[in-house]
Image (cartoon, rainbow, N blue to C red):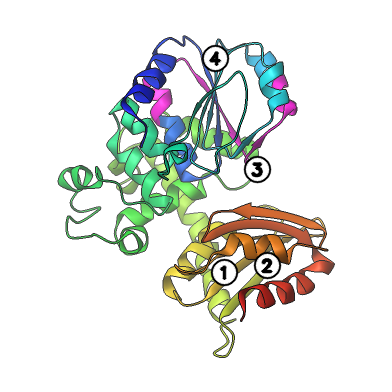
Amino acid sequence: MLTEKEVIRLREELESSQHPLFFFHDDPDGLASYLMCQRFTPDGRGIVVKAQPHITTMFLSKVQEICPDKVFVLDIALVDQEFIDGCPVPVVWVDHHDPQDRDKVAYFNPRRHNVNVPASALIYQVTQKDIWLATVGCISDWYLPEFAKDFSAQYPDLLPPTVNKIETALFDTPLAKLIKAFSFLLKGPTSEVNKSIKIMTRIEGPYEILRQETSRGKLIYKKYEEINELYTQMLDKAFSKLDGKDKMLVYTYVDDKLSLTKDLANELLYRYADHIIILGRERHGEVRFSLRSPAGINLKPALEKALIGIEGYGGGHENACGAAVKKEDFPRFLENLHKELGL
């Protein structure tokens, strides 16, 4: 978590901004972080960063268009120094990926203290509001926070107090449906995603969605149902790829509209915890894929070595990475990864 001094500083950054602009990652952790900030500073604007979590100078046009008094970057792994230098207003960056060295930015990252917790946990530490959003964001990022006990006390039907394993919370509780709803509303064309995010800024609690108590909640739930039908079909197809001899489960699909690789990879790792999971989406001559591994298998260095001589890129955490390679290089990449992991 953040130090007490950092909490005070970040709270001051939020409170002193009249019309901030928030760039946030397109996953439930990033979305929950933004929604908590937006409730804390209701005159702010949010822009979801789809595909790669990387802020480059191309985002300066949005700053110029919106004219905020401060820019916040939430749950984004990389921010170029050129963006910071070219930004006409102060930049505040809240993240939990590998620490970066940048100048002229207020940077908050618990990994500088050898602690790794999701961005939504950091924002909740500062705002102390909307525990349901913070819990969704944290659990979606494979982290069971201490305040989950308080959430369970308020919503025992969604997260029973007896649940003490992150995998159970993420896949085998009623809260799992809400987490999927957060993830699924970020899928598809940017225009549709922005409409869903705007609706989410007005949602007041989890039951509004899960029980479809309002027209707003019904719209979010309807999108969840539509995408979940496709998700379930793809999950079944991925199951069919299991090979009793190979500890690597590889499944790719072709789709120009939706990327479900992260969601599918996470659930498959839970269902088949002794496998390396690779879920890929073929698009524009590339295979963009998510990788997951059981505890004790460090994917990151193996991925980096497997990409040597391959046209592509990738990175991430010890047990969860993302990558993209040219379609024709994908088979060779898999051979390299098999070798590096000793499978």
Q: Where is residue 202, by image quadrant?
A: top left
Q: Earlier in the sequence, mark 3 or mark 2?
A: 3
In the image, residue 48 lies at what x, y percent? Answer: 58, 34
Q: Quadrant of the C terminus?
A: bottom right
Q: Which residue is mark 1?
A: 234
Count the numbered circles shown: 4
Separation (CA) of disc 3 from disc 2: 18 Å
Q: Residue at x 69, y 26 (%)?
A: 81
Q: For mark 4, does the 10 Å Cα neighbourhood hold few (<14), some (14 to 19), or many (20 or more) residues?
A: many
In the image, residue 298 lies at what x, y percent? Answer: 54, 64
Separation (CA) of disc 1 from disc 4: 42 Å
Q: Where is residue 160, by image quadrant?
A: bottom left
Q: Secondary structure at mark 4?
A: loop
Q: Earlier in the sequence, mark 2 or mark 4?
A: 4
Marks 2 & 4, CB-CB < 8 Å contact: no
On screen, residue 157 versus residue 185, left or right, reads left
Marks 1 & 2, CB-CB < 8 Å contact: yes
Q: Earlier in the sequence, mark 1 or mark 4?
A: 4
